[in-house]
Image (cartoon, grey):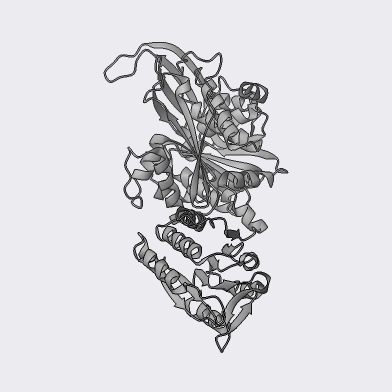
Amino acid sequence: MQQKILILAANPKGTTPLRLDEEVREIDAGLQRARHRERFILEQRWAVRSRDIRRAMLDFNPQIVHFSGHGTGDEGLVFEDETGLPKLVDGLALAELFSLFADVECIVLNGCYSEIQAEAISQHINYVIGMSRDIGDSAAIEFAVGFYDALGSGQSVEFAYKFGCAATRLTGIPEQLTPILKKKPKSPKDIQNDKDDFQKIIDLIKKQENKEIDVITISANNYDRFLSVDEIRPDHESVILKEFSCAGGSGANTVCGLSMLGKKTSIVGCVKDDDDGLKIKESFSSFSVDNELLIIENDIAFCKQQTGKTWILVEKFSARRLISVIPGINNCLSEILRANNGQKLEKVIEKVKKSKILHLTSFAGKPEMDLQLDILEQIRDEDIVVSFTPGAIYVAEGLNKLSGFLVSTNILFLYTEQLNRLLERSDEIEKFKRELPLKQKVQMFFDWKIRKQMTHPMILIIRDYLQDIPMDVYQNQIYIASHHDQEVNFYSHRSQKTKGKNKTIIPEDTTGSGDALVTGFLYGILEQKDIITCADFGLILCLNVSKKLGARSNLLNDTLLNHILH
């Protein structure tokens, strides 16, 4: 986008002669050689009268206005009258005029004692530069040339101001403190918008303090069977060393963990009225999870279905896994909820609206994905925080196909490999390479979000390992990216390998560690903690769950979690 710079120059009869032509010539020369010279158009008006100011503003609608001439402090800036003699224009009059032009971003008053006018104008314009005292010709020229050199190289107004001051000092002129930058005071709305996305999410949580449910999840529910084996590799007959079984399911594990931490949670899903289904329901009851919307299906129409099952082979000395899933009745959830004119679905939406956070995880069936999208559409106008763990199944759909989820997602949980797959499967992301630094990949993701005009707050939580194979539970790394004003702020957890924990601990099972990370992070959000503490909670639970088979085997209560943190 091109920016117009309007120069207004005045040196009336009877005032000290100024080298205005030299100043403008040097500004023009600097812009002509600038790296981004095509972005700027320089317009000039000389021997300016008051009517010339308003006409030039209408003619050019500039983004930057540069006054070059005399200032007198309280009385105003010196322009010319019809006869070429001095005519004073005060700051309030200029402020009123400039406030009518929404495109004006910056005004430079390169005249003596113009700070007073800069203060008045800055009530309406984002950036205004004035002079705190008298300023010599050479200093005024050096500042202006340095300022526009920096703008021409693509720098911000604030950087350009500092650069102009530095340029003045480099020439040996001791007037680098004379230019003063004034910024428009922030309105309450500006202050809100100035917060990064993490803080905006915390503000959403604060608005929902009276809701009765902390987190509700729509999740597949499986009964997990773990086999700890000596080795997993092709054509190898693995020796079973240990067996273990328990209730599972990604979102289901998360709400159980949150209930353990004292939060009110609810599950939406379905199981069959078989032994595994009843064990899953009993597990929710033991964790005090509201399972009113866990459907125990016994309709003859689903007689061939069974409760979802998962077989998980876990390699003893590396915790590598081989997972096989029978979705079973999970693939019928959409059909079950939409039956009878959607009566059960209406109950689900009603309960979701009573919740602070809706946590979504993947299903194997396409109808269940569509069901989740329909629910998101129906709660779009509600102040509900949406967290999303797409998992490998949904990630395989690619970034563009997940837009329906991401347009509502506030908290997105991914592994580094999942981020890679999302980016490389998007036709809209150019120059992606797997070897790029993580921060650059994250920036690509948020740039895509902006191009899609997704303006809602979103943070990205990425789990990674320091090694390809996590031989130590302390190899887990949690990175958080929070968007703020076109930039991405990066955070990470504090080290958990502290005193007394210097030995290597090989994980026994990492199946539920991702769900535990979500548990800890959402707990921190609900407790309105800072972003680092949220990451710490997530990491602590992630590490703890990795030490035993089963996603719910080694969860912590809130007292133990906070004790470990501190």
Asked if residue 231 lies left or right of residue 268, the reply is left
Number of marks in picture = 0
Q: Nearer the viewer, residue 468 or 218?
A: 468
Given the current orientation, which residue lies at the most extreme right position?
A: 210
Q: Nearer the viewer, residue 372 or 429?
A: 429
Relative vertical location of residue 255 with respect to residue 139 in this rendering, above or below: above
Q: Residue furthest bottom?
A: 83
Q: Is residue 547 visible?
A: yes
Location of residue 486 with respect to 252 vertically, above or below: below
Q: Quadrant of the N terminus?
A: bottom left
Relative vertical location of residue 307 with respect to residue 123 in this rendering, above or below: above
Q: Is residue 298 visible?
A: no
Describe residue 343's horizontal placement relative to residue 62 as left or right.
right
Which residue is located at x 70 percent, y 40 percent? 212
Please tell me which residue lies in front, 136 or 179: 136
Q: Position of residue 27 (x, y in %)?
A: 42, 67
Q: Residue at x 57, y 47 (%)?
A: 196
Picture coordinates of residue 16 (x, y %)?
Answer: 54, 75
Residue beneath the point at 39% across and 21% down: 320
